[in-house]
Each structure stands twice: as structure tokens, then as C-alpha cells.
Image (tube, helix red, strand yellow):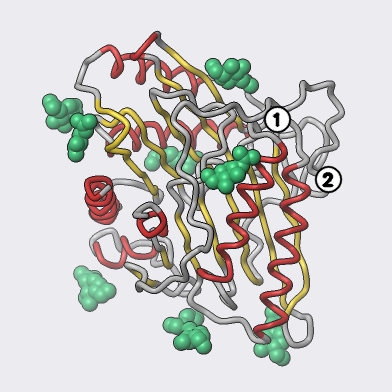
Amino acid sequence: MSSFLSCLLLIFIFTFTSQLSIAKSFLPVCDNNKGNYTNNSVYHTNLKTLLSTLTSNTQIKHGFYNSSFGINSDKVNAIGLCRGDIKPNDCQNCLKNSSALLTQTCQNQKEAIGWYDDEICMLRYSSRSIFGLNETRPVYVEWNINNATNEDEFNAKVKKLLDGLRKRASSGDSNLKYAVGSDKVGVNNNDTLYGLVQCTPDLSKTSCDDCLLQSIKQVPYCCNNKIGGRVLRPSCYLRYETNSLFYQTTSSQSPSPSPSSSPSSSPSSSPPPPSSSPSSSPSQSPPSPVPPLSAPPPFAQNNTSPQPQDNKGNTSRNVLPKIPLMLFLLWSMLSSF
Ligand SMILES: *[C@@H]1O[C@H](CO)[C@@H](O)[C@H](O)[C@H]1NC(C)=O
Ligand SMILES: *[C@@H]1O[C@H](CO)[C@@H](O)[C@H](O)[C@H]1NC(C)=O
Ligand SMILES: *[C@@H]1O[C@H](CO)[C@@H](O)[C@H](O)[C@H]1NC(C)=O
Ligand SMILES: *[C@@H]1O[C@H](CO)[C@@H](O)[C@H](O)[C@H]1NC(C)=O
Ligand SMILES: *[C@@H]1O[C@H](CO)[C@@H](O)[C@H](O)[C@H]1NC(C)=O
Ligand SMILES: *[C@@H]1O[C@H](CO)[C@@H](O)[C@H](O)[C@H]1NC(C)=O
Ligand SMILES: *[C@@H]1O[C@H](CO)[C@@H](O)[C@H](O)[C@H]1NC(C)=O
Ligand SMILES: *[C@@H]1O[C@H](CO)[C@@H](O)[C@H](O)[C@H]1NC(C)=O
Ligand SMILES: *[C@@H]1O[C@H](CO)[C@@H](O)[C@H](O)[C@H]1NC(C)=O
């Protein structure tokens, strides 16, 4: 476990120091406990082949990429997921960029995951089968340091919005499990709360619902009264913001209009989502009470401050705005039981 953590720290440092050469922010996690491969091994070759076919597949319309390559212990499985509002072309580019960054960062780990630039896409691969699994680790939690006015009402509205979105997303089909929505908050109801939740669509309805439920339960600990928050897991994603419409409202991914208002109209006779198969390496069950955050987050930043544009010569300025405003690796606390 501690080696995994040191790896994470190194990755954070890597992410910090390499921001100038990376156009967009990227959050990678290399798993040191699921095996290593060596350069130019069969696994390495399979991984490269798989990622290049995955990211050149232009048939994908709903932002979900899933495939495997190789046999036996050299088989590589990968899943790519774009946020439900991302256009197919941007999705592909996002996954392309992610696969380059992830293989550069995690140079010999067989299993790795990365989230790209405001989580517009997520890419993961492993030597074990990951399709259809409810995977809740690692988890990242992130929040805006600014407080909402009207605390009790705000927290209740965030929960209500996210719970509604959870139900809509989890009843999506095997192509898309995604929902967005908004509500009015604040003293005069003049502020707008925007929410987005999504599962990888290979999850069963129950697994999706479960994964999002766990993330929603996290919100009072990470993000109590915070005007924005995010919870990132391999199988599901949650984000909300106040007065910042962070998603595109017209989806271009779906051939039928607007999954944003009705996420699973499912006009096609698509097969039912596969039920989550038992994992050969089951994810550890979580501790029942979620520990409140006691450790300070490793870095903080004011989300509302403007991002400097043209000062490429200044590392500190150029770097910091690309780091998520606040990030806390809850995984480290949850996994040490
Ligand atoms: C894999 O490599 C990492 C460092 O890159 C190391 O910490 C870890 O122990 C290795 N795992 C195995 C199973 O060899
Ligand atoms: C594997 O290749 C990468 C990049 O090509 C290089 O940085 C790394 O040092 C190599 N690792 C080993 C163990 O040779
Ligand atoms: C995803 O990959 C698994 C394992 O290879 C396969 O069984 C499944 O049919 C694939 N699903 C899709 C939608 O491609
Ligand atoms: C991928 O990276 C290139 C070069 O850094 C960048 O121009 C492009 O916008 C990125 N694509 C996405 C979808 O972010
Ligand atoms: C938000 O509220 C908390 C608790 O009341 C307080 O400690 C913190 O300083 C506030 N943050 C800001 C940015 O005002
Ligand atoms: C809403 O009203 C409050 C109090 O009048 C004010 O502080 C806040 O800036 C307003 N928000 C917007 C988005 O106008
Ligand atoms: C999903 O995983 C979590 C924790 O790993 C577990 O609590 C939950 O029961 C799982 N849900 C399903 C449907 O397998
Ligand atoms: C964040 O930035 C906004 C706008 O620049 C400013 O009004 C606010 O005081 C800042 N908050 C903190 C905690 O720095
Ligand atoms: C870089 O930014 C720091 C603080 O953000 C500032 O003190 C410094 O003068 C800047 N340097 C240059 C060359 O712009």
C-alpha cells in the first residue's frame, strides 16, 4: 500500500513539474500492486496495440470504449469513457492524449487509470478483466474552497439534485449512463446549481446506482457547503458547481436528441446492460462509516481566480491554475484498513 502511495506522490510531483509540456491537466494513478511489465515485452506491445486501436475507433458514438487484446497473462483490457456531453471527435482526441500521458506516467505498471482535463475523459487498463465491474477505488475528491450562503438549504439541494441525477443516470442503457440537471439556490434563489453524474455504461443499473450513492455520501465530508465539488471513481463520476455551467447542454454524442433532459430514452433495441460479474479480484469492501476529512488537502487554489494566459516563462503561474483547485486523495485513507 505504501508503495502505491509513494507512487501517487511521485505522480503528483510529475504532474506538477510536467505541466508546462502538457497542454491540459491530467490525473494519473499507477497501480503498483497489480503487476509490472518490462519494456518491449509482449504485454507492452499488446498495450500499445490496444490503445492505438481503441483511440482510432471512429465508430463509437456514445463515448464508451471497451476492448481487449492479447491472450493469457499478456491480455490487456482497456476502458475509455468520455463525459456524456463530449463530442465524438473531442472524445477520441481526449483518449488519444490520455493514452500517451498514461503510458508515459505509468511506464511499467500493468494497471493504470487517468482522468484528463476536467474529466472530459477517463482511460484505464489492466491485465485483469475490468468490463462490467463496479470499481470504486481509487477515489479522488475535490472541492471549491468557497462557501455557499444558506448552508442547510444549499447542502439539502445539492443532495436532492444529485440523488435525482443518480436515478436517471443509473437507468440509462448500455451505451450511456449519464445525467445532468440544475436547481436554483441562494438567498433569492438567484444562484444556479449545476450537477452531472455518470457511470461507465457497462455497469448494471444496481452497480451504477451503488457507485453514485457512495459518491453522494462522500459529499457531506468533502464538500459540505462548498459551492463546487467532484468525486472521481473508475466506475462513476460526480460533479456539481454553482453559477458555472461546466457541461454542454446539447449532446452531440447521441443520434437522438438530448440525453441531458432524458438520459435513457433508449429508442434502439439495445441489449440490456450486462449485470456485474463477480470479480476474480474483488475490490475491497469499503469501511462502512466514511471517515470525515481530517487531513488538510495537499494543495488549494481559488477556483475563481482568472487563469493567466500568455506567460509561458513563468512556471509557477502557468502551472498552478491547471492543477485542480483542491484535491484530496481519499483513497489513501480508505484503503489502509
Ligand atoms: C512494480 O514496480 C514498482 C515500481 O515501479 C514497484 O514498487 C513494485 O514493487 C513492483 N511490483 C512488483 C509486483 O514487482
Ligand atoms: C522503458 O522505456 C522508457 C521510455 O522509452 C524509459 O524511460 C525507461 O527507462 C525504460 N525502462 C527500462 C527499465 O528500461
Ligand atoms: C467489452 O469487452 C468485453 C470483454 O472483452 C466483451 O465481453 C464485451 O462484449 C465488450 N462490450 C462492448 C460493448 O464492446
Ligand atoms: C490533445 O493534446 C493536444 C496537444 O497538446 C491539444 O492541442 C488538444 O486540444 C488535446 N485534445 C483534447 C481533447 O484536449
Ligand atoms: C468556509 O467555511 C468554513 C467553516 O465555516 C471556514 O472555516 C472557511 O474559512 C470558509 N471558507 C471561505 C473561503 O470562506
Ligand atoms: C444573488 O444574490 C445575492 C444576495 O443578494 C448576491 O450576493 C449574489 O451575488 C447574487 N448572485 C448572482 C448570481 O447574481
Ligand atoms: C459496488 O462496490 C461497492 C464497494 O466496492 C459495494 O459496496 C457495492 O455493494 C457494490 N455494488 C454492487 C452492485 O456490486
Ligand atoms: C477567490 O477569488 C475571488 C475572485 O477573484 C475573490 O473574490 C475571493 O475573495 C477569493 N477567495 C479566496 C479564498 O481567495
Ligand atoms: C512569476 O510569478 C511569480 C509569482 O506568481 C512572480 O513573483 C514572478 O515575478 C514571476 N516571474 C516572471 C518572470 O514573470
- Note whether residue 86 is visible: no
- Quick one: quadrant of the C terminus? bottom left
Residue at which label 1 appears = 175
- Looking at the rendering, the quadrant in which ligand 1 lies is top left
* Extreme residue toward the top, this view: 71
Describe the element under mark 1 as helix, strand or loop.
Answer: loop
**In the image, what residue type sits under mark 1?**
Asn
Viewer-nearest residue: 122 or 251? 122
**Which residue: 83% across, 45% down?**
262
Viewer can see residue 297: yes
Q: Which amino acid does the dot numbered 2 rest on? A: Ser
Q: Quadrant of residue 215?
A: bottom right
What residue sits 62% from the left and 60% below the top? 216
Q: Residue at x 40, y 8 (%)?
A: 71
Circle number at residue 262 = 2
Residue 40: mark: none
| Residue 66 to residue 198: above or below | above
- The CA span between labels 1 and 2 is 14 Å
Residue 305: image quadrant is bottom left
> What SS does tag 2 mark?
loop
Instruction: Residue 308: give x, y in percent of width and height.
Output: 39, 67
Is 162 positioned to the left or the right of 263 in the image? left
Q: Position of residue 178 (x, y in %)?
A: 70, 44
In this rendering, the count of numbered labels is 2
